[in-house]
Amino acid sequence: MLHHAGKRRVKRRDLTLAWLPSELGGLALTDQSDKDAGQEAALLALFVRNQTKVALVLPVMAALFALSNLVWARWDAAVIWLACALGAQGVQLSLCRYYESADNRLVRPGEWVGMLAASELLFASS
């Protein structure tokens, strides 16, 4: 730890859960120094490709869900929810398309993971 003007500054380390032998207690946090950037980029490309493939299915499913909720909810609440769901899916789809057209996507896959995870959270919370 570094001391600076009475405040502690801690160097940030990437940690992950890993299985340890049973005599050491099962799960533990370990350092991610051996993280493979190529594997992360490949998984990210797989996620983006899958999201663009279901781009037409999700709005249809959201519309069917909004229609089925008209039994329990008022029509204006269902329409507002549908607009929010379609907007969140539009944000995620535009990020996926921007990722596919970007030149620097392999340079910093961690930033793309963060942006797409935030768009997935937005879509899931709608």
Image: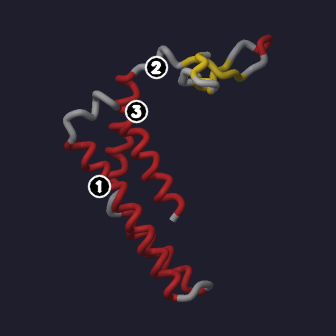
Determine the CA span between mark 1 and mark 2. Answer: 28 Å
Give me the residue at 80% from left, 11% from top: 23
- Label 2, residues with CA under 10 Å away: few <14, some 14-19, many ≥20: few
Label located before the other in sequence (1 or 3) = 1
Query: Which residue is tagged 3?
Result: 110
The image shows residue 64 at horizontal and vertical percentages of 46, 75
Which of the pair 11/71 is nearer the observer? Answer: 11
Q: Which mark lies nearer to you, 3 or 2?
A: 3
Farthest-out residue, front: 5
As drawn, the label of residue 112 is none
Q: Report the colour scheme.
A: secondary structure
Determine the CA span between mark 3 and mark 2. Answer: 11 Å
Q: Is residue 98 left or right of residue 16?
A: left
As drawn, the label of residue 35 is 2
Q: Is residue 74 above or below residue 27?
A: below
Q: Secondary structure at mark 1?
A: helix
Q: Secondary structure at mark 2?
A: loop
The image shows residue 54 at horizontal and vertical percentages of 36, 56
- Label 3, residues with CA under 10 Å away: few <14, some 14-19, many ≥20: some
The image shows residue 81 at horizontal and vertical percentages of 49, 75
Identify which amino acid the numbered label 1 is placed on.
Answer: Ser
Q: Is residue 19 above or below residue 56?
A: above
Identify which amino acid the numbered label 3 is placed on.
Answer: Gly
Q: Is residue 54 above or below residue 61?
A: above
As drawn, the label of residue 94 is 1
